[in-house]
Amino acid sequence: MKKAPKRSARPASGTPEGVSLNVRRPSFDFGALPRYWCGGNPWKTHFGTALMLVFPSGERFVVQGVRRYRKAITDPKLAEEVDRFCAQEGFHSREHGKLNRLLFARGFAGLARFEKLQSDTLKLMGRIFPERFQLALSASIEHLTSSFGHQALSQREELEAMHPVARELLIWHAIEEMEHKSVAFDVHRALGGGQAARVAGLALVVPMVLVVTYAIFLYLLAADRRLFDGKMWKAELVDAQLANLRRIRAGERAIGLFTALPRDVAAFLRPSFHPWDLDDRALIADAASYDPIAELARRGVANATPATV
C-alpha cells in the first residue's frame, strides 16, 4: 500500500503577505524586434537569447512536476497558487515559443536543434526519474529562474538599453518568476520533500543550464560571424569584468545575470532555506508599476486559462 505523503508542520504556502500571483495575458508582437535587441550589443543579445531559448521546454517540465500533485495539496492558499503558477508558466512558454520561431526564421535555424535536444532531454528525465524527484528538480529550476529575474530587474540601466518589446517581455517574465518563486518549493516541502533531494536536484540543474546556455550562445556568435571577434571578446571578458570589479570594490552591484549565481546556490544549500529569505516585494512592486506591465495586470484575471504547456 502506498504511503500518504508526509505533511510539513510549517504553513504550506511561504508566499508572504502583499504578494499576489497575477496572471497577466500578454501577446507580444516580436516582428519589430531588431537583431541586436539589447542596446545594439551582439554579446548581450545572444547571451540573453541563449538563456531564453530553454524557457518553453523547461517551463513545461516544471508545470508537469508541480501540477501532478495539485490534488494532494490541502492548504487552499497553496492550491490556488499552484493554479496561478501553472497559468503564468503557460503564458511564459507560449510567448517565448513565439520568439523562438521568429529567431528560427531570421537565420538561426540551428536553434531548432538545440530546442529539440533540450526538450528530448527533459522528456527523458521525466521517464527515468521518480516523480517526487522531478518535483525537487522543479523547485531547483524555479530557484534559478527567480535568481535570474532578480538580477534582471535590479539592473535598470541594462533594461533601459533594451528594445521596448524585449524590455516588456523580460520585465513581465521576471516579475512573475519572483511572484511564484516559492510555489514549487512549498509543494515539495508540503509533501515531505527534504534538503537532500533539493540539493541533488540543484546539482543536476545548474551544470545543465550552464552547459546548454553557453553552447547556444557560442552557436549564435558563430552563426552571426562574431565567434572570433577579438575586440568584442576583450570588451566583454576583460573590460566589462574589470568594470565589475570596480563596482564591487565601490560597494555596488556587479552587472550580469549570472553574477549572483554563487550566492544563490549557496543559499539554496542551507537546511533552513526558503525562497522568500530574499524578500523581493519592493523589487516586484517597482517593476510592476512600469506602465506596460501594469496594463497587463489590469487586463489579467485570477482564473486565467493557462496556455497549453
Image (tube, rainbow, N blue to C red):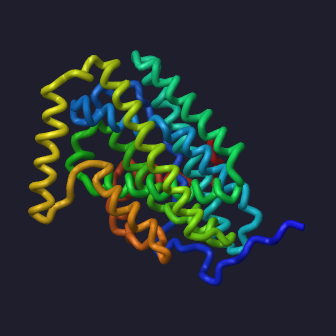
Left or right: where does residue 303 sit relative to residue 27? right
Left or right: where does residue 141 sit relative to residue 174? right
Q: Quadrant of the C terminus?
A: top right
Q: Residue at x 35, y 56 (%)?
A: 261
Q: How many discs appear?
A: 0
Vertical comparison of 249 with 233: above or below: below
Left or right: where does residue 81 sit relative to residue 167? right
- Return the residue nearer the eye: 300 or 94: 94
Left or right: where does residue 49 sit relative to residue 18? left
Vertical comparison of 301 with 79: above or below: above
Q: Residue at x 15, y 25 (%)?
A: 230
Q: Is residue 194 visible?
A: yes
Vertical comparison of 7 with 55: above or below: below
Displayed quadrant of residue 195: bottom right
Seen as rendered, the residue at the extreme right is 1
Q: Is residue 302 visible?
A: no
Q: Quadrant of the N terminus?
A: bottom right
Give the percent coordinates (x, y) of residue 300: 54, 53
Give the percent coordinates (x, y) of residue 287: 34, 57
Give the percent coordinates (x, y) of residue 148: 38, 52
Q: Residue at x 25, y 53 (%)?
A: 155
Seen as rendered, the residue at the extreme bottom is 9
Give the percent coordinates (x, y) of residue 142: 50, 56
Vertical comparison of 280 with 305: above or below: below
Q: Residue at x 56, y 49 (%)?
A: 89
